[in-house]
Structure formats: structure tokens, C-alpha cells
Image: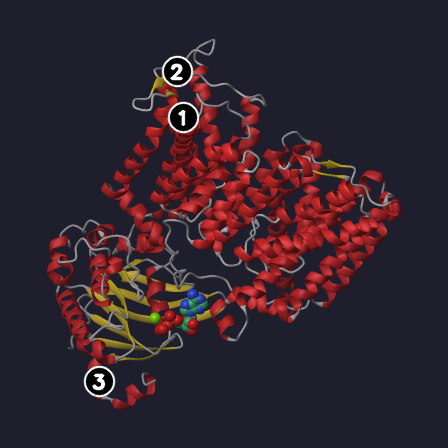
Amino acid sequence: MDALILQALNGLASASSLFLVASGLTVIFGVSRIVNFAHGSLYMLGAYLGWTLVTRFAGGGAPGPLGFWGGVLLAALAVGLIGVAIEVLLLRRLYRAPELFPLLATFGVVLIVQDLALWAWGPQDLLGPRAPGLHGAVELPLLGLRFPRYELFLIALGPVVLGLLWLLFRRTRFGLLIRAATEDREMVGALGVDQRALFTGVFFLGAVLAGLAGALQLPRESVNLHMDLAVIVEAFVVVVVGGLGSLGGAFLAALLIGELHAFGILVFPRITLVLVFLVMAVVLVLRPHGLAGAAPAAVPPGAPGAAEPVIRPAPLALRRFALAVFALACALPSVLGDYALSVFADFAVFVLFAMSLHLLMGPGGMASFGHAAYFGIGAYAAALLAHHLAAPMAAGIALAPLAAGLAGLAFGWFCVRLSGVYAAMLTLAFAQIAWSVAFQWVEVTGGDNGILGVWPDAWARDRRVFAWLALALSAGGTLLLLRAIHAPFGYALRALRDSAPRAAAIGIPALTVRWLAFAFAAGLAGLAGALFAYGKGSVFPTLLAIPRSVDALLMVLLGGVRTVTGPIWGALAYAGLSEQLVRATDHWRLLLGLAIVALVLFFPEGLAGAARRWWEARESDGRR
Amino acid sequence: MTGALPPALLAVEGLEARYGRARILAGLTFHVARGEVVVLLGRNGAGKSTTLKAIMGLVPPTAGRVRLAGRDLAGLPPFRIARAGLGYVPEERRLFAGLTVRENLAVGMRPAPPGRQPWTEERLFALFPALAALRDRPAGRMSGGEQQMLAIARTLAGNPRLLLLDEPAEGLAPVVVERLAEAVKALRAEGLGILLSEQNLRFAGAVGDRALILETGAIRWEGPLATLLAEEALRARYLAV
Ligand SMILES: Nc1ncnc2c1ncn2[C@@H]1O[C@H](COP(=O)(O)OP(=O)(O)O)[C@@H](O)[C@H]1O
Ligand SMILES: [Mg+2]
């Protein structure tokens, strides 16, 4: 009994921290509609800066001249200013862009901050100081239990912050404008309010809360470079479960998730992560806008959007070009060395991976933030077959797309029922579930150690043969996808993207078409994953992790969502770039992050989009 | 009314707007004077809403000028245009449904230019007495007529010099439409310029001075509202469904 009460109290303390992070995230989203991936980085920076400010100005780990509390508050303010810088320099330029772009840009910021933090504070975990006055434990009245003072302080802090935010929102003009802008920011602008100042203010507020939460972790846990993604994923769950933009919802959801963690550890120690994402999936299925969220206002009519270009069969010149490139690709393996051959096979895999995601994002108009799940499930299916059943490669390659496709059917059933950010977050949640299974179910998947010895059959073990095999399967999968885009199925999918009501009116079964597209894309991603597993000879949980999903998104965007074959070029360019970066420099994260930011800011149409624009301009010049 | 034209408060010249590649407004030129109510008439899809949005900067004009008291506003962001003295009441009203009546008004409040009597909460409630009783009610839980009044009051709270009203009478009961007409006349009497769009003549006829008839994004007829009311053939040609 005592253990249960203690566990419940621990859950409350975690819930407070989670709420501090999630409240900033949800307020920022409410006003700016930006899903701020970098919010976890702000939290991490709060912890690092807090550590420096509290410890550095005195020797021996004793609190410096600022004192603990001064250091924590100063760190929170400094993070607030960093948030303002991110808003002013980067996000301000993206408010009118499609919602995926700011998300990716903030992921670029995550990479940049990771590298800068590594450079500034080093790779080792840093131990924080104790909070003066809140050492040790106290005897809780009535319960007769001893409980750490600092945790009690955190438990109280959550409701206090909620109350202060409530006052801010109800009693000040700033708060009033935040609430109004959360409902309809364009209308707020039409009433004469400068939205830029409002957004900057909101980012400051959100970043201060994240920095504060990070700095307040110092007495509880060590500071490390993994805090950012760990907390952002949980904060996403809290925000989505609570309802995007809702403070009260975020508070409730933080309590729910905090307690779920606390008791999950007692009951199902092996699947706590899965549990959290399952709860999120269940909540979203029952309440598609979260516990306290309202359905987002319909996109205001009059928002000028450039019409999507019509997809036409490629002009003859382009088809000849594609054929020539393919012929070149076929010939290439005969002259490549060992290392180049394995890079070649990787490129073939990435092309298929990117093309499969493109079916969803381009013609499907859906955003998947967890496409790595299907890539990883395909890879693990092949690896498990090889490892546990000693199955031949042919079986792995045949069954992997099936396994990934089935997962796509299962996850997709839920995802296609939601829209926009909720759908993207649900895809992320499912990917995290798949990742947790690979990570935590050690007996079967080997956990973090992965599965080794997944080699191709003898006939394909020669690197050259394997490169051709990868090329053949990748090209086959790509042609299948192109075929689908130009078939009635593809027309139906695009009709749904462009106007769901009108498509439904002519009898297109919306959910079924999207669901099948989801499963189809998942299956081909699984094929890519299986090839990757055989090419590398091993699989690890990172195959299903967030960065790999981001890889896929970047390849598609770099190539151009609105083109058909763009993702091929995007995959080649991106894989080539990251390959070079990793080989050439220790600071590949920084450079990759900067590249992502530049891509989003300056090439929103992608490579193929820019090429098409150039081509069309040339054509129309020629005609004149 | 004859004699020298009053100086134009709003002067629109060659206004053009597009959605993607489709040109919706094909170069509109017209003006609205102080204390004048100009009615933009036209069938569904003629481009009335787009005209008002282009003036307000919500759809950036691709060509043309929008001058308010001589100052060119085309190309500015909407909040600058609002601060320059244009007030916009959208067709869908776009109230903040979760905010109360008073909070909606507070969002719209802006200081009045020097020398003008500012719109206070009391004056707005005097103009629309129905709102006074609902002051703490969330805007989402009001009737259509009450919402329309609140939408107008919220925009007036910014002390505009010219009001853009997009189909204010759409879907409202006749009694409510009469109340709205009273309010519009009172605003005109205060010297406000008003540009309002309408599809039928019931409300427009009661409040308008001049009419512009819009068809596929171009002005097809312009003249006193009285003429339009008198000439059956004109109405049949441009306005009958
Ligand atoms: N957001 C939009 N995107 C594309 N076309 C639009 C959009 N809004 C309106 N249109 C088109 O512009 C034309 C004029 O519309 P609108 O100005 O709303 O007309 P009205 O208000 O006179 O009914 C119509 O053909 C309409 O289909
Ligand atoms: Mg209209």
C-alpha cells in the first residue's frame, strides 16, 4: 500500500515537469499552428544552462553566487530568448508554409542544438546540484511516509503554474489575444493586431516554461544529450491526448501519462513505453481531437493556395532521360568497388523508401511522421526469419513487405481517420510503439543489441550481385508505385486530397482508398527495410526511430512533394549528402540541421520542383 | 444629390486578385465617400467576398491600388490596413466562439484617432441593445442575428473610418435585418463610409446610396440604387438567379 502511494506521488512529480514542457508546446501550437520539435531542445538547453549557471560560478559543485534558484530562473529566461531567436530568425518565415515545413525546420534546429550542446558541454552526463532548502525527505502527515522534499515541491509547482497561466490568459490583454488567435489568428490580424509580436511573445512564454522545466530537473536526474528527444516525444503525447492548444487538457493528460508511467513500471515493467502510446492511440480513436480539444476551425476560405500542378505523363525528353539514368544505374555496379557497391545498394533502398512515403504525402496528401516503422518492421521481419527460422533470403524478401503491409493495415486504419497534425502525431505514436517493441522485447529482438548475421543467400552474397538485386527490387517497387499513381486508384487518391467532399459525392470511398494507400506504401517501405537488413547484415532499433522517419520526409521534400519522380532525386541527393557529411566531419548533425533549415527556407518546392519550374520557363520562352 | 463630388474616402483603382492561376478580380475601379453606403451586388461566385478580402489584404492584390484618404494600402499586411482605418466584417462572421461577448469586443478594441469619439463598450451596447444582455455569454452560443451584431460591434471597436460588410443580412430573419438596417443608417449618419456586399435587394435597397454590379470579377453596372430599384430589366439581367 505504501509503495503504491509513493509511486502515485512520484507520478505526480513527473506529471508536473511534463506539464511545464507540454504547456509551452500546446500554447505555441495553438497560436502559431507550429508543431515545435525543438521544444525538447529548449528543455535540454534549460538543463545545461541551469547546470552551468548554478555550478560554474563557484568551485567544487557548491552553488555559485547566483544561488540555485537564481541560476534556474536565469536559465529559463535565457532559454526564452533562444526561443525568441528561433521564432524571429526561422519560423516567422514559415507561417504560411504547409504544416510539415515548420515541423521539419524545427527538427533541423534539434540537430543543430544537439551538436552545439555536445561542443559546449561534452558527451558525459552532468550531475546537477541539490536544491538548497529542499534536501532530504519529510514525513508526510496522515500517511506516515517519508517522501523527498524536492518532489513535493514539484508536485505543487504544476498546479501553481497552471493557475498562473490561467490568470495570464483570463486577466491580461496578451492572454486574451492568445486565446483569440488560437481560434482564428487571421481574424485577429484583420482586427489590427500585429501577429508577429504575438507569436514572438508566445514563443518566449513557451520557451521559458520549457527552460524552467529543464533546469528544475537538475536535482532529480543527470543532464545528458538524449533529454531532448525523450521529453519531446512524451510532450507530444501529452499535448495530443490533452487536445492541441488546450492548457487544461495538457494538465489532465500530463497527470494521466505521469501516473501511467509510475504504475506501468510496477505492473508491466517491460512495456511502459508501448503503454503510453497505446493510451494515446485509444484516446485519439475515441476523441479525435484529444480530451479537451475542439475540432479545428475549418481552413478559412480565402487563404490563397497555389493549385497543385496537374500530374501528366512525363514529357518524352524526360522519359528518355529517366531511361538513360536507369541504364547507367544498371551498368554502374560492374565498375564499382566494394565500398561503393554497398553505398549503391543503400541508395537503391532509400529511393524505394522515399517513393513509398511519397505516395502518401504527394498524391495522398497525408503526412506520415512514422514511416520508419514500416521500414523497420520489414527489416525486423527479415532478420527474425533469418535468425530464428534460418529462412532463406527469398522468404525474407517475400514476407517482409507482407509484415509491413499488415502493420500498415493495422496502424493505417486509425491514422486515415484523423487529419492534419493529429494524423501525423498518430503515425509518430505508432512508430514509437514499434520502436519500443524492438527496444524492450529483448528475448525476441535482442533489444538494443539488435540482431546480427542477417546475410543474403550464397548466390547473392557477392556485393555486385546484391547491388543488382537491390536495384531490380527498388526499380520494380518504384514502377509499381508510379503505375498506381497513374491508375484510377491514384486519381481517386488525388481527388480525395484536393476535395474530399466532392470526391465523396462522386462515390469514392474515402477511408478505404486512403487505407489501402497507407498499407501499400507500408508494404513497399517494408521491402526497402528488408533489403537494407540483408545489405547491412544486421538490424537495430534505430531503424524504426524518429530520425529515420525524418530521413524519409527529407528525401521526399528535398526532391519535391508535388512532383512524381522528385523523391528519387531527393533520396539520392540526401543519402549522398548525409553519407558525405558523416564521413567528412564530426559535426554532421550541425551541418545536416543547417541544410534542412536552408532547404525548408529556400527550396520549398524541392529539387525536381525547381527543375520543373526551370524547364517550364524554358519551354514557354521557346514558344514565344 | 448633385454638385461637387465629396472627396473619396476609399478609392480603388484597377484592383486585381488571383487564387493560384485563376484570376478572380479583373481590375476593379470604384470609390466610397465619407457617409456613403455603396452596395456591391452580384450573384454567388461573382467575386464580392474576394473584393472585400483584397481590399483588406487578406487576399494580396496582384495589381491595383487601394487608397484610404489618399494613403495607398495595397500590399500591406491586414493588421496595418486595419490600423489605417479599415474595418472588415467577414461573411462567415468568424467570431471567437469560446470568448464571451465582452472579450470579443476587447480583442477588437483599438484607440481612436485623435479628434474622434471612440467606440466604447457602452456605445456599442447602445447601438446593439440585444448584446448588452448577453455580455458574458460565449459568442458560440448566440443566435445568428446576435452573432452578426457582435461581429459588426467587434470591428467597430477598432474605430475604423470605413467598414467592409460582407453579406451581413445573409440568412437572418426579417426583424433582425431591419435592426441591422437601422444600425447601418446610424453609422452612415456618423460619417462612416460603408462598402457592403449583398445578393438581394431587400437589405441593400433599405440602406444603400449607390450600387456596383459585379459579374465574373468585373463591374458591369454602376449607378444610384434608386435607379436599380426602379428598373426591372436591369435587375433581371444581372441579379435574377
Ligand atoms: N479560397 C479560394 N480558392 C480558390 N477559389 C476561390 C476561393 N474563394 C473563392 N474562390 C472562387 O472565386 C470566385 C469568387 O468567389 P467569391 O469572391 O467568394 O464570390 P461571392 O462572394 O461573390 O459569392 C468564385 O468562382 C470562387 O469559386
Ligand atoms: Mg461571398
Q: Which amino acid does label 1 sit on?
A: Asp
Badge 2 and badge 1 both on one subunit:
yes
Q: What residue type is labelled 2?
A: Gly
Q: Where does label 2 land, which residue? A: A136
Mark 1 chain: A
Q: Where does label 1 land, which residue? A: A2
Badge 1 and badge 3 both on one subunit:
no
- Are there few (<14), some (14-19), or many (20+) residues within 10 Å of tag 3? few
Q: Which of the two residues, B53 or B145, is positioned nearer the viewer here?
A: B145
Question: Residue at left 81%, top 43%?
Answer: A390
Question: Residue at left 47%, top 19%?
Answer: A128
Ligand 1 within 8 Å of disc 1? The answer is no
Q: Where does label 3 land, which residue? A: B229
Question: Left of A526 or right of it: where is A518?
Answer: left
The mark closer to the camera, 1 or 3, is 1
Question: Residue at left 63%, top 37%?
Answer: A441
Determine the CA span between mark 2 and mark 1: 19 Å
